[in-house]
Image: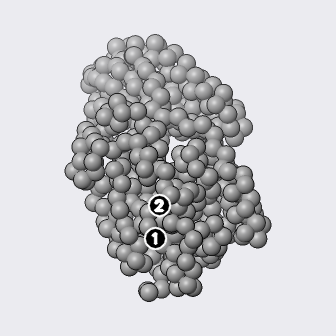
Amino acid sequence: MTGFDALDLLAEIEGVGRDRRRGGYTRHVFDDAERELRDWFVERAQRLELEVTTDRNGNLWAWWGEPGPDAFVTGSHLDSVPGGGAHDGPLGVVSALAAVEQLKAAGFVPSRPLAVVVFAEEEGSRFGLACLGSRLLAGAVAPDRLQQLTDAAGQRFVDVARDASLDAPGYDAESLARIGVYVELHVEQGKGLIDLDAPVAVGSSILEHGRWRIDVHGQGNHAGTTDIADRRDPMLPAAAAVLAARRAAARRTGSRATIGRLEPVPGGTNVIASRVSAWMDVRADSEADTRDIVAEVQAAVAEAAAAEGCEASVIEESYSGEVRFDPQLRDRIATTLGGIPALPTGAGHDAGVLAAHVPTAMLFVRNPSGISHAPEEGADDDAVRAGVDALARTIEDLA
Ligand code: HGY
Ligand code: MN
Ligand code: MN
């Protein structure tokens, strides 16, 4: 058995999918980089004598023992946001492999089936729906929505899935029924563990969150020959959305609203755009706050569009209610690990999707920058090793 140290495993993939233009990593589902990571994962899992299968939704399952009911499942994702960090997703996958290797080397034999899972398209960065692999598994994607999912190049998910030899993506009752408990280790995407001066925490909850697309239509024209009075520039209502999102969230404690993606068409320096799409991410402690923020932004966009002679629409693309992880499981893991702290998160995860179906928990590992979804995301070596130990001890206790 080769000695797997999670840091060595991270080092093996640190060059895959580097994004020279944005910095950080860009690894989108079924693109070259993510496929390279999939191949790497399969090879590493097979070296641990785990049996790897791919389910109908592109999720990878590396089984220790027969796939079976009531399995202990751990893992995360390998895809990234554009220009993302090295740890968001991969840390949970490499830590699971390292924990399995550590347990095998110590002669541990699980009393129940155990799987390391890699969920597909957790970030939703290619097809626009976050946690696509786990949502499909859980039957949380309507068939007509599935057919509509396309990437920026107009490729449909269903076609890309077929080309990846996935048959008929969709609800996978059989795979879901095999999961007895799911524990996901993830780099902390905040400063909670820095403030607590602790390497590892157990997750308590995930904020309500949703995504909306704002489309504004105006009149394309020449930047140099079109008088201001004659313009119908869709960038103005889009700009109003950006400012209104910040204003509305800033007035509600704990709320967050972000427009980080804006696509004018045609996008020329000397061209007044004919239309603009903006994507808004809103998160808050309650559905009421989330929806109030969206309503405020919607009103600001409508006012700006009317003033500019543009048409605007705000379409909800996804919504996830607050997730409270299983309190018994949370407390049992915290006790097993000597009383580690519990932390909420504003970040969505596949664990948030599965929490509606099976007892689910998360382990967070300290990130010395507290930054995520950016190249500065990190996880210090001691915390990474503490995370692997924490996961190994959790597996010993629960599997
Ligand atoms: O967007 C999120 O919260 C997660 O990183 N997918
Ligand atoms: Mn992420
Ligand atoms: Mn993640």
Tell me the residue that label 1 is attached to: 65
Question: What kind of residue is marked 2?
Answer: Gly
Identify residue for label 2: 68
Residue 355, above or below 378: above
Q: For residue 363, which quarter of the picture?
A: bottom right
Q: Is residue 35 visible?
A: yes
Q: For the residue labelled by badge 1, is the local secondary structure a helix, a strand or a loop?
A: loop
Please tell me which residue is depicted at 43% across the width and 86% down the height of the picture. Answer: 2
Residue visible at 49% across and 17% down in the picture: 302
Percent coordinates x, y for residue 304 in the rendering? 49, 18
| 11 lies above or below 54 | below
As helix, strand or loop, the secondary structure at mark 2 comes to: loop
Residue that sits furthest to the left in the current view: 163
The image shows residue 21, relative to residue 275, as above or below, that is below
Crowd rating for badge 2 (residues with CA inside 10 Å; few <14, some 14–19, many 20+):
some
**What percent of the width, then of the height, locates residue 184?**
56, 60
- Residue 35 position, x and y percent, is 30, 61
Determine whether label 1 and label 2 are within 8 Å by CB. Answer: yes
Q: Residue at x 43, y 50 (%)?
A: 174
- Disc marking residue 165: none
Asked if one can make out residue 247 in the rendered structure from this viewpoint, the answer is no
